[in-house]
Amino acid sequence: MSFNRFPKMNNWQLQGLAILRIITGLLMAYHGLEVFDPGKMTEYAKWEVLQTLPSPLLMVYFGKGIELVTGVLLTIGLLTRTVALIMAINMFVICFRVGTGKFYYEDQHPFLFGLLGLVFFFTGPVCWSLDQVIFKKARNAYTV
C-alpha cells in the first residue's frame, strides 16, 4: 500500500469537509469576538493560572486575537493549513496549559477545536476557499 496516494474523495465528501471548515471557522471567530469586551478580558486575566505569566492581560488579548483571526481566515479558506495549525496549537495550549488538561471531561471544548484544526491542517481547504482562487489550484491532494 502506497502512502503517497490518497483515496479519491467524492464531491459530497469534499463539500462536507468544506462545510465543517466554514462552521468551525465561524464558531472560532465567535469565541474570538470576546477580544472586544474589555470587562470579559480583564476577568480572564485574573485567572490564577494566568498570573504566572509576565503580562496576563496581554496574553489573554493575544489568545483571543488568535481565535478571532484564525476563525475568520478558516471560514474564508485563506492560508488554511497554516491557520489551522496555529488554531490547533492555541486550543491545545488552552486545554493543557490554561485548563486542567482533562480533555475527556472539563476541557473538551478547546480540545475538540484543536482536533478540528488538525483535520484542516491535514486536508487543507478542500473547496470553496480563497486559497483555490488566489493560488489557482487546490492546496491539497483533493479537488472538486
Image (spheres, rainbow, N blue to C red):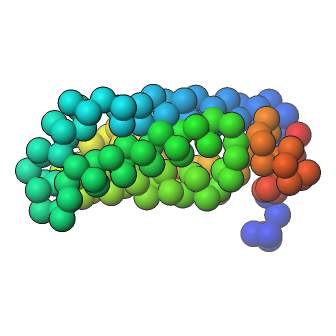
What is the residue that sits farthest to the left in this orientation? 48
Q: How many marks?
A: 0
Q: Quadrant of residue 3?
A: bottom right
Q: Residue at x 28, y 53 (%)?
A: 58
Q: Residue at x 18, y 65 (%)?
A: 54
The quadrant of the picture occupied by the N terminus is bottom right
x and y, in percent, of residue 53 in the image? 18, 62
Q: Residue at x 61, y 58 (%)?
A: 82
Q: Quadrant of residue 9?
A: top right
* 39 and 120: which is toward the camera: 39
The quadrant of the picture occupied by the C terminus is top right
x and y, in percent, of residue 2 in the image? 80, 71
Q: Tell me if I can see residue 103 in this picture.
A: no
* 57 and 47: which is toward the camera: 57
Task: In the rendered view, tell whether residue 55 sits above or below residue 110.
Answer: below
Q: Residue at x 85, y 34 (%)?
A: 11
Q: Tell me if I can see residue 92 in this picture.
A: yes
Q: Quadrant of residue 33?
A: top left
* 56 and 95: which is toward the camera: 56
x and y, in percent, of residue 31 in the image? 40, 32
Using residue 88 as the reference point, say whether residue 120 is left or right of it.
Answer: right
Task: In the rendered view, tell whether residue 119 sits above or below residue 27.
Answer: below
Using residue 53 as the reference point, say whether residue 35 is left or right of it.
Answer: right
x and y, in percent, of residue 43 in the image? 16, 36
